[in-house]
Image (cartoon, grey):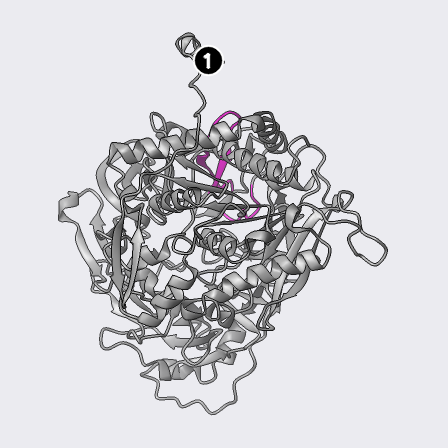
Amino acid sequence: MPDADTALQPEPAAPAAAPVAERRPTTRTHHGDTFTDDYEWLRDGEDPAVVAHLEAETAWAEAQTAHLAPLRERLFAEIKERTLETDLSVPVRQGGYWYYSRTVEGQQYPIHARVPVAQAGDRTPPRVEPGEVPAGEQVLLDENVEARGHDFFSLGGSDVSADGSRLLYQVDTQGDERYTLRLRDLTTGQELPDVVEDTAPGATFTPDGAYVFYLTVDEAWRPDKVWRHRVGTPVSEDVVVFHEPDERFWVGVGVTRSERFVVIEAAAKLTSEVRLIDVAEPEAEPRVVWARREGVEYTVEHAVLPGDADGAGRDVLLVLHDDGAVNFELVVTPVPGAGAPLDPADAVVVLSHDPAVRLDAVEAFATHVVLGYRREALTRVGVVDVAALARAAVGAAALDAASGVVPTDVPEPLPVRELELDEPLFTVGLGASPEWDQPTVRVVTESFVTPPGVHDLDLATGELTLLKRQPVLGGYDPERYVQLREWATAEDGTRVPVSLVWRRDAVTLDGAGTRAEPAPLLLYGYGSYEYSMDPWFSVPRLSLLDRGVVFAVAHVRGGGELGRRWYDDGKMAAKPHTFTDFVAVGRHLVAAGWTAPGRMVAEGGSAGGLLMGAVVNLAPDLFAGVHAAVPFVDPLTSMLDPTLPLTVTEWEEWGDPLHDPEIYAVMKGYAPYENVPDDAAHYPQILATTSFHDTRVLYVEPAKWVARLRAAGAPVLLRIEMAAGHGGVSGRYARWEQVAWENAWLLGVLGLAEG
């Protein structure tokens, strides 16, 4: 209930009309083409006139959707009623403790805690009833406490030293993804004086907790430096361990699971380079594994293969790379010495390239290696015994440069034991498994109809044990829902996968499986950065399915569902395939009887928001509504300005229109902002949502787009969060309110606001 002071304040009057941004024309000319931009002035977020305009846009969006308030309340209540608000994650063992997070009803953020391992050999996580606090709990970090007094809070990363005595954590209270790094003594609970401002997410202790390696960003908000901090010394004495001057590359840092190496990776979209520091010599210079080669990506994992009769293991590196292997292959190579980088030609191939299988990840443990890959547009997990890995690397003794042994045998095929799941669509991947020597690893599974499950996979036997399934309250039954995969045909003949899920009794099918009548449908898409829209479970989505909405995902080119070539065929000059694929999927769903243009809404966020903007220009009559979240709808302006955050890095995704006239022409042809017609009154209802502190897609892009759409007569709304970043508002209840607002708009467009 409102307090007394609030109750005395009158409700603000509803806006009489939609805000109209002033036209302040500026021109730009590139490659002989001149474009007049009426709304570039909205970029100045410190201008009171800009802030007033943005606030007016949100006020107008609220006024135009005021009639949906009862529906929003119902949707929020449904999310809340289906969620076990006081809950605890499955504990993960590391060293002498079980680590977990828990939530408490009424609190926005999780609490991170641990309990001691009762017995040294105990591998069974402690079971705790919902609502109980584990006996002997030590709270490491309560995000609710840290968030007090802030409208926004985000935990960027955290780590505990191997001996369990120290915690590092990073917090952002603006939404701009610049984090303050702090250290805490877990034996006393006291904060240490070691505080570093403006770090990038991703920091790690050395195993002994004596050093911290962390990242900072340059003026373009690109992580470009790795720093070393000795705990207990002034931050002013911190040392730059590595600096990446090439603006295309982002830098990351971590420690191998074996706790043997600090790993520094510099990666652009198509090229990467890895350096190692032996943790026994944390102040040593990093050693390059493979020297950087343009267009070659690789990742490194430390493994120990079985040794000679004396039992001594052999340190090697497992390298996933794409040199002549577009879907990547796995090789074994020695650890680099103090001299020159290793020669890739000396590596031993243990898992050859397969055009039908995209290798994504390799995770090494003491006795086994776990592979992550995708086949037939679905993720997979496979396990390999390290002894088999050693046998596959014929002449493994040759990995020891001093041995002088020349391999003569023929390599064995690498036996991979794949984890089998019994659903037609699913997502599977390795969960938190921090320890090197453990007999089981965590595996997480989910689908469109099955909530996420946390399992223990026995590495020796392959047995999968379910530890916990995300609870969904209110009598949720996955059998009430159906998921399937269809294929649409793009205009160039390419087959595009489409995933669908619906409530069984809400969509009428005849005996042949044909829809008796078109259903309301939400079509989601992304299609960039080789990011795959793998099946995921969503509690808020249930409110849509239960009202008869079919949810569909268009797995368009530019994503990674069908391997690296699927990505390559939807980027740079081939980017228009992403948009035409999505339109083809929409038309397929109409032709197949799933829906009709007046009953379909499209949705996408970030690069998927670019997809929405391009699609609404390509096929405005195909959809009843379009929701573009934090949308990258002014890409040409952004990619022409190398001083903007991320622009140079992004040239390898979209192309460089500043220097390449062909790319300029391609981008000019699809950029949503440039291609709004003079008369857009026939456009579907459009909702753009964004955040003022977004550093990935600046708020100005949707603000300009909406201004131009409105000037052209399109029915458009803009809702902006003034205290949030790219991921939207923080806090689970605030996020539920946000998604309830968006889903209420969606149902209103579909004519289901009374449902």
Q: How many marks?
A: 1
Q: From this viewpoint, is residue 263 visible? A: no
Range of magenta residues: 98-125
Estimate the x, y position of residue 2 in percent, counting from the top left.
46, 13
Estimate the x, y position of residue 399 in percent, counting from the top left.
38, 80
User: In the picture provided, is 332 more to the left or to the right than 438?
Assistant: left
Estimate the x, y position of residue 707 in percent, counting from the top left.
39, 42
User: In the picture provided, is 44 more to the left or to the right than 313?
Assistant: left
Residue at horizontal 67 percent and vertical 30 percent from the top:
754
Q: Is residue 110 magenta-colored?
A: yes
**Residue 741 or 717: which is nearer the viewer?**
717
**Residue 425 or 88: which is nearer the viewer?**
425
Residue at horizontal 32 percent and vertical 63 percent from the top:
265
**Residue 331 or 544: which is nearer the viewer?**
544
Residue type pointed to by label 1: Pro
User: In the picture provided, is 448 more to the left or to the right than 740?
Assistant: right
Residue at the right extreme? 511
Q: Is residue 142 above or below residue 410?
A: above
Disc 1 crowd rating (10 Å Cα; few below 14, some 14-19, many 20+) is few
The residue under label 1 is 2
State the SS at label 1: loop
Residue at the left extreme? 237
